[in-house]
Image (spheres, helix red, strand yellow):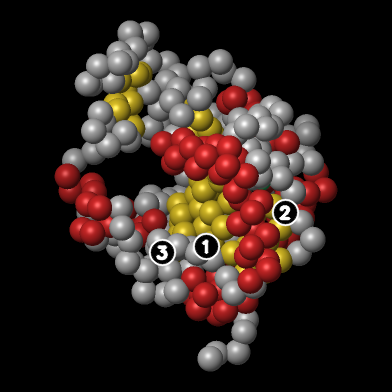
Amino acid sequence: MSEIRRDPLRGHWTIIAHARGKRPSDFTRSAHATERGKVCPFCPGNERLTPEEVMAVRPSDDPANQPGWSVRVIPNKYPAVQNDLPERPIETGGLFERVPAMGVHELVILSPEHDRSCAQLSVDHWNTVLAVCQHRMHELWRDPNTQHVALFMNHGPAAGASREHPHMQIVSAPVSAPVSDRMLTSLRAHYKAKQTCMVCDILQSEVTQDVRIVAQDKTYVTIAPFASRLPYELWIVPRAHRSTFLSVPAGDRRRFATHLRDIFERLTNQLGNVPFNAILHSSRPGPDDPKAPFHWHFEIAPRLAELAGLEWGSGAHINPVSPEAAASQLKGDAPK
Ligand SMILES: [Zn+2]
Ligand SMILES: [Zn+2]
């Protein structure tokens, strides 16, 4: 039985996913770091090893769950949330708030090629991946119980990836995400004071100062954020104010694919094949709420260092690489 519990003191939610049935030894890094030599269920020809696909991009008359696809979406075999939980009363308002972990957990296998990294996928291919993600996220938002849909990627064991084969994950949940809630609180306060979107204002200041810009084009800007928690943390921010990634039209989506691929290439060129997490921050589909002007963006966080006691206990991070130095390096400036 999976359920989502709220910490009454700190406000975070935790998915208690006991059904995943892990033992303490399963959590050691080496237990899931040594996948080499094992059969990869995400590779073409091994489709029978995964749950039946939700959708795949393949020639239209090819049968499902067979090789020939270029992007494949499957239910996660070990979901953090599930749609077939027995109905349970929701307990809210007390000290121990809990809701059943109802939702959908899908994996988007980025390409048939096991070793093709994010930097090696073509712009066309990224565009297809992003279109598939938009489509699936729209579908998950159709459930009236959905309060949050996360799109994220873990790459490398240090970033929590249990499979090497590049894939993204989509998770819908019946509660909103605390990180999104905190951003909305800041955006609302800023809007109340200035009647502008804080992210638009940050972007404008960053472009003017030009000390933390990694790359920019007509549609997107990548910055190393001012208070980066991790070395080489990056935000890809669209110049156009739009609350949700889900309404990004095809032309801008393709430009995002171009920009995203460029950023992955820069990271690979400068840092090598580093583990990273990437996550989309986006509001639900629908028109912008002018009083809560969310501004979608995409965050990439290389995981070069483990979180230690100070970070875990206090939320204060120690970042040994200044965002200005990170931006300069990734931008390709001459070393100073
Ligand atoms: Zn594979
Ligand atoms: Zn904005």
Measure the alpha-carbon separation of dots 1 and 3: 10 Å
Outermost right residue = 251
Q: Say which element carries label 2.
A: loop
Q: Quadrant of residue 65?
A: top right
Instruction: Name the residue rendered at 69%, 27% in the picture.
Output: 286
Amino acid on which the number 2 mark rests in the picture: Arg
Around disc 1, counting alpha carbons within 10 Å, would you say few (fewer than 14), some (14 to 19), or many (20 or more)? many
Q: Amino acid at mark 3?
A: Leu
Seen at 23% across and 33% down, the residue is 9
What numbered label is drawn on residue 230?
3
Q: Position of residue 153 (x, y in %)?
A: 50, 49
Q: Residue furthest front?
A: 193
Residue 304 quadrant: bottom left
Q: Position of residue 50 (x, y in %)?
A: 48, 36
| Residue 128 image position (x, y, % from top left) | 72, 46
Number of other residues with Cα within 10 Å of mark 3, as a class: few under 14, some 14 to 19, many 20 or more: many
Distance between mark 2 and mark 1 Cα atoms:
15 Å
**Left or right: where does residue 246 sit relative to residue 53?**
right
Residue that badge 1 annotates: 225
Which residue corresponds to the image point at 52% horizontal and 39% vertical from the top-left?
189
Question: First in sequence: mark 2 or mark 3?
Answer: 3
Q: Visible in this render: residue 68?
A: no
Foreground residue among 258 and 197: 197
Q: 142 or 119, which lies in front?
A: 142
Residue that label 2 marks: 239
